[in-house]
Every structure is written in structure tokens, then in C-alpha cells.
Image (tube, rainbow, N blue to C red):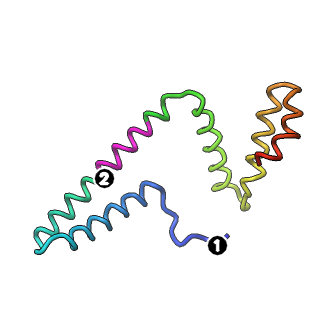
């Protein structure tokens, strides 16, 4: 897999998108430099406010718990292993191992599920 040119977080990418979009909208939609600057700044502020609003809403949903809270823990661990492990890591064996471990915890009946259905899932 080729190394990416830039390694941006979602937040950094969203800020760059807001900045570039604001500049383009300011240049394209307004006639003089003063109006372009004001409109560009206004558009950028609107994008950033929307970004923080969406982030806040997602954070509230994530903090509410429930069934998907443990899924977030699994994804956080998977991401940490993929980004911090010494050698490159293929995520498929990690996900398969996680699924097998989850099914083994339940009972002996899931042994049949593991051999029969897991091959179809992953």
C-alpha cells in the first residue's frame, strides 16, 4: 500500500475543506475584494460552527453508551494496533480473531456458528 502524501485527521481535513471552500466561494460570488474577504470569513466561520456542532452531536451520541459503546472500544484498539505497531498490520486477521473470541465467550453452540457462519461473514 503506498504511503499517503498527507496524514490528516478528520478534523484537520474538515478545516482545510472549510478554508478552501470559503476562499472559492468568496472569489466566485463577490465582485470586489472587500466583499470577497467578508464573505469568505463569514463562510469559514459558518463551516467551523457547523463542524463543531456536528462533532458535539456525535460526541453526545457516543457518550450515551449502549450496544455500540463496546464497538467503539474495539475500533479504538484496532486503530491503535494498526497505527502504532512496529510492523504493518493487516486488519482482517485482527477482526476475525475478535469475532472468534466474541463467539467463544458465549457457549459451545457458537462453535458451530463459528465454523459455519463466520466463513461467510469474513
Answer yes or no: do the residues labelled 1 and 2 have beta carbons within 8 Å?
no
Residue 104 part of the magenta segment: no
Q: Looking at the image, tell me whether mark 1 or mark 2 is earlier in sequence order.
A: 1
Which quadrant would residue 24 be assigned to in this image? bottom left
Q: Secondary structure at mark 1?
A: loop
The main secondary structure of the magenta stretch is helix
Q: Position of residue 20 (x, y in %)?
A: 32, 68
Residue topped by disc 1: 2
Quarter in which the N terminus is drawn: bottom right
Residue 44 is situated, as x and y percent measured from the top left of the image, at: 26, 59
Tell me: residue 62, above or below residue 49: above
Residue 88 image-quadrant placement: bottom right
As drawn, is 90 to the left or to the right of 41?
right
Tag 2 secondary structure: helix
| Picture disc at residue 82 | none
Instruction: Give the residue drawn at x 16%, y 67%.
Output: 37
Read off the residue under disc 2.
Answer: 48
Amino acid at each position: 500500500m503506498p504511503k499517503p502524501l498527507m496524514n490528516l485527521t478528520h478534523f484537520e481535513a474538515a478545516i482545510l475543506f472549510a478554508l478552501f471552500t470559503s476562499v472559492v466561494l468568496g472569489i466566485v460570488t463577490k465582485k470586489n475584494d472587500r466583499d470577497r474577504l467578508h464573505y469568505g470569513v463569514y463562510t469559514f466561520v459558518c463551516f467551523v460552527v457547523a463542524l463543531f456542532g456536528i462533532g458535539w452531536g456525535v460526541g453526545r451520541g457516543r457518550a450515551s453508551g449502549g450496544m455500540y459503546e463496546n464497538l467503539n472500544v474495539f475500533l479504538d484498539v484496532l486503530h491503535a494496533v494498526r497505527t502504532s505497531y512496529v510492523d504493518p498490520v493487516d486488519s482482517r486477521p485482527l477482526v476475525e480473531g475478535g469475532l472468534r473470541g466474541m463467539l467463544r465467550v458465549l457457549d459451545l453452540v457458537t462453535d458451530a456458528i463459528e465454523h459455519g457462519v463466520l466463513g461467510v461473514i469474513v
